[in-house]
Image (cartoon, grey):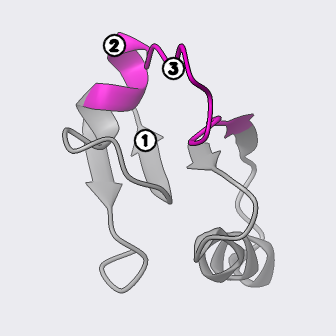
Amino acid sequence: MKLYWAPQTRSPRAIWMLEESGIDYEMELVDLRGTDRQDTDAFLAASPMGKVPAISDGNVHMSESAAI
């Protein structure tokens, strides 16, 4: 599973959920404040609106911390 996250967002909620459930995951930082921000296709598949947190597990994608 991959978690797309950024500091000073609601990403800690998703990190907490993943840690509590013991799921193996990797984290990918999304620079929301970058002036030349270019989101990857994988991130946009998980979060079409380009918001974090978002998770991706194979063909399953989810964004918005409340949904995750």
Residue, disc 3: 37
Is residue 9 at all visible to an observer of this figure?
Answer: yes
Q: Is residue 54 left or right of residue 6?
A: left
Residue, disc 2: 41
Q: Nearer the viewer, residue 29 or 24?
A: 29
Which of the 4 image quadrants contains residue 33?
Answer: top right
> Quick check: is 30 in the magenta stretch?
yes
Q: Position of residue 48 (x, y in %)?
A: 19, 38
Q: Amino acid at mark 3?
A: Arg
Q: Amino acid at mark 1?
A: Ser
Residue 57 versus residue 15 in the image, above or below: above
Name which residue lies at 25% across and 29% down: 45
Residue 64 versus residue 56 in the image, above or below: below
Name which residue lies at 74% across and 81% down: 16
Q: Is residue 58 left or right of residue 53?
A: left
Q: Residues within 10 Å of mark 2 (few under 14, many from 20)?
A: few
Q: Amino acid at mark 2?
A: Asp
Which of the 4 image quadrants contains residue 66?
Answer: bottom left
Q: Nearer the viewer, residue 31 or 5?
A: 31
Question: Main SS of the magenta segment?
Answer: loop
